[in-house]
Image (spheres, rainbow, N blue to C red):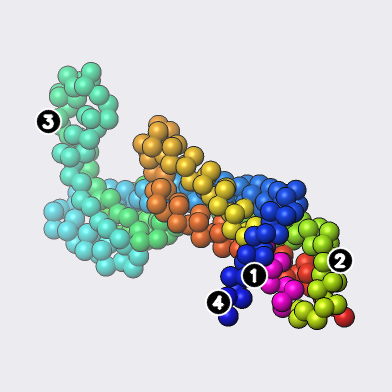
């Protein structure tokens, strides 16, 4: 059995060399299509990475009433922590808020702010994060009903627009990827069909001498596997090394914005799985479907 498999792969490799221009056409179709698909996947994965980062920054700022006592503040914290879907609760005193304000404004206004430090009227606040960032707004609405809470900032306007935008981008990207996959399957299959059609006499002769359908099919099947594997390896190498160079140059972040890009290892493993898996599947599918019509009695 092993000898037969090696023989079929050897014949498939010889066929690739023997049919030089048709092999080049097939590899070009596979390579270009998977290259476009791979670039799209890299962009989509990094877009998803950025969306996860952005949604992870969503939080609810909870401001106490000025009349709230320390015991009431602790009770409020306990009530919020008991709410379902709460990931973390961080207490920020008014003194810390004032220091943060000084840092954000800049050292040039230290003289002005130093006169206000003694009369700090900023309220204590809580920073609350939800387990599911999409439920941040709903969590803020529940917290706003607590008796010692003066007001809540949940960024509802920004959050709702952000989620709508991310949903649209994800749906468009998904539809584009599915369209590319379907296009690749038919394009590569048709290319392999042309290759096999040019060798239909060879198939007819093999049938006349008594060769079985699978004996005839295997060399073409292995040829499709080789075309899919080689056609996937070329765009994978091009995309991987280009991404690694770009990732290193920008320091793992999107330009000057602090959006972390997908790690090189994660991109490489996922890209290899998709491109090689799709390339082999298309090669096998194209080989089987293309030779089928010539094997009908």
- State the mark number for residue 70: none
What is the span of residues highlighted in magenta in the rendered image?
Answer: 214-225
Q: Is residue 259 visible?
A: no
CA distance separating discs 2 and 4: 28 Å
Query: Is-magenta flag for residue 229?
Result: no
From the image, tell me which residue sits under label 2: 201
- State the mark number for residue 118: 3
Picture residue at 27% right of the left edge, 58% below the top:
88
Of the numbered discs 4 and 3, the one sitting upstream in the chain is 4
Q: Nearer the viewer, residue 157 or 232?
A: 232
Q: Residues within 10 Å of mark 2 (few under 14, many from 20)?
A: few
Horizontal and vertical percent position of residue 296: 85, 78
From the image, tell me which residue sits under label 1: 8
- State the mark number for residue 2: 4
CA distance separating discs 1 and 4: 10 Å
Label 2: which secondary element: helix
CA distance separating discs 1 and 2: 19 Å
Indicate left or right for 257 with 6 as reference.
Answer: left
């Amino acid at each position: 059995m092993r000898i037969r498999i090696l023989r079929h792969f050897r014949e498939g490799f010889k066929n690739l060399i023997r049919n030089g221009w048709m092999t080049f056409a097939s590899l070009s179709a596979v390579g270009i299509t998977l290259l476009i698909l791979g670039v799209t996947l890299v962009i989509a994965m990094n877009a998803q990475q950025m969306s996860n980062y952005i949604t992870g920054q969503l939080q609810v700022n909870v401001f106490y009433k000025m009349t709230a006592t320390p015991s009431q503040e602790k009770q409020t914290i306990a009530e919020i922590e008991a709410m379902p879907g709460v990931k973390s609760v961080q207490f920020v005193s008014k003194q810390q808020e004032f220091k943060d304000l000084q840092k954000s404004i800049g050292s040039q206004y230290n003289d002005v702010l130093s006169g206000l430090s003694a009369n700090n009227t900023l309220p204590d606040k809580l920073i609350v994060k939800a387990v599911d960032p999409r439920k941040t707004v709903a969590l803020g609405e529940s917290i706003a009903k607590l008796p010692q809470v003066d007001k809540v900032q949940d960024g509802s306007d920004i959050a709702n627009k952000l989620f709508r935008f991310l949903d649209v981008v994800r749906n468009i990207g998904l539809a584009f990827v599915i369209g590319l996959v379907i296009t690749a399957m038919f394009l590569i299959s048709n290319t392999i069909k042309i290759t096999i059609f040019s060798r239909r006499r060879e198939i007819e002769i093999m049938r006349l001498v008594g060769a079985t359908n699978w004996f005839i099919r295997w060399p073409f099947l292995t040829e499709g596997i080789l075309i899919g594997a080689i056609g996937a390896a070329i765009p994978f190498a091009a995309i991987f090394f280009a991404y690694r160079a770009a990732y290193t140059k920008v320091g793992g972040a999107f330009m000057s914005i602090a959006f972390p890009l997908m790690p090189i290892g994660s991109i490489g493993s996922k890209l290899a799985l998709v491109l090689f898996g799709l390339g082999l599947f298309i090669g096998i599918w194209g080989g089987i479907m293309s030779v089928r019509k010539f094997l009908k009695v």
